[in-house]
Image (spheres, rainbow, N blue to C red):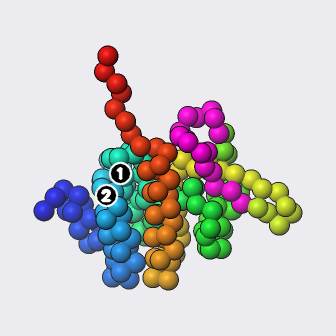
Amino acid sequence: MKKWEKNISEFMGMICDEEKTVYKPIMDFLIELEYTPIKKRTKGFILSFSNLSHNRVMARFGIREGSTDSFFGLRFSACTDYSDKFSNVIRERIESKNNRLAKCNSCKYCKGDKFVYTYKFQNGETKAACGAFMLDIPQVTLDNIAEIKKLIKEQHDYFMKHALYTLPQRT
């Protein structure tokens, strides 16, 4: 058994059966796209799924220190078509005190097209949050899995086109 398989097994042992049925197909899809779960050295238990081709983290699953509740975080900033559930996650991030406003061209994270989370408020104003970060998706259910997979695939395709990791040239 590989180390990452042990880490997934350990995480699955920490969550309830309902969460297992929701998280497992998402994890399997990430692994299918060659994302490897790495256990973060932090308090609590966090698995970050990243792909060595572009060295970006796509998703996180975990339990934070002092909590018994699991969480799921997803990066979908290159996506533009999603349900109200995901739109509301973006709105909540923009309205929160933890918002990292989009400062494109200053952080050098984006390669290729700039990508940010955007939300258009009822008054017509559009605001953006930096797309370099994952957003926690609350209350993920079986009904959300198809959309989550679609968002993962779209974000993955963006990374494969714009953020491939290349080794520096030797001189």
Q: Is residue 1 above or below residue 110?
A: below
Task: Quadrant for the C terminus, please.
Answer: top left
Is 1 left, or right, of 140 in this rendering?
Answer: left
Which residue is label 2 attached to?
34
Asked whether residue 44 is in view, the answer is no
Question: What residue span does the magenta drawing correspond to?
Answer: 104-119
Mark 2, Cα crowd under 10 Å, few <14 / some 14-19 / many 20+, is some
> Is disc 1 placed on a helix, strand or loop?
strand
Residue in the picture at 18% in, 56% down: 3
Q: Is residue 143 left or right of residue 10?
A: right
Q: Which residue is found at the position 26% from the left and 72% from the top?
A: 13
Magenta stretch encompasses residue 66: no
Q: Position of residue 150 (x, y in %)?
A: 49, 69
Q: Main secondary structure of the magenta part?
A: loop
Residue beneath the point at 23% across and 68% down: 9
Q: For the residue labelled by badge 2, is the local secondary structure a helix, a strand or a loop? A: loop
Residues 108 and 45: in front is 108
| Quarter of the figure that contains the N terminus | bottom left
Looking at the image, which residue sits at the far right?
Answer: 123
Nearest the camera: 5 or 152?
A: 152
> Given contact means CB atoms under 8 Å apart, are the residues at marks 1 and 2 in contact?
yes
Q: For residue 23, which numbered disc appears in the image?
A: none
Numbered circle sitting on residue 51: 1
Q: Which residue is painted at 46% across and 64% down in the image?
A: 153
Dot 1 amino acid type: Asn
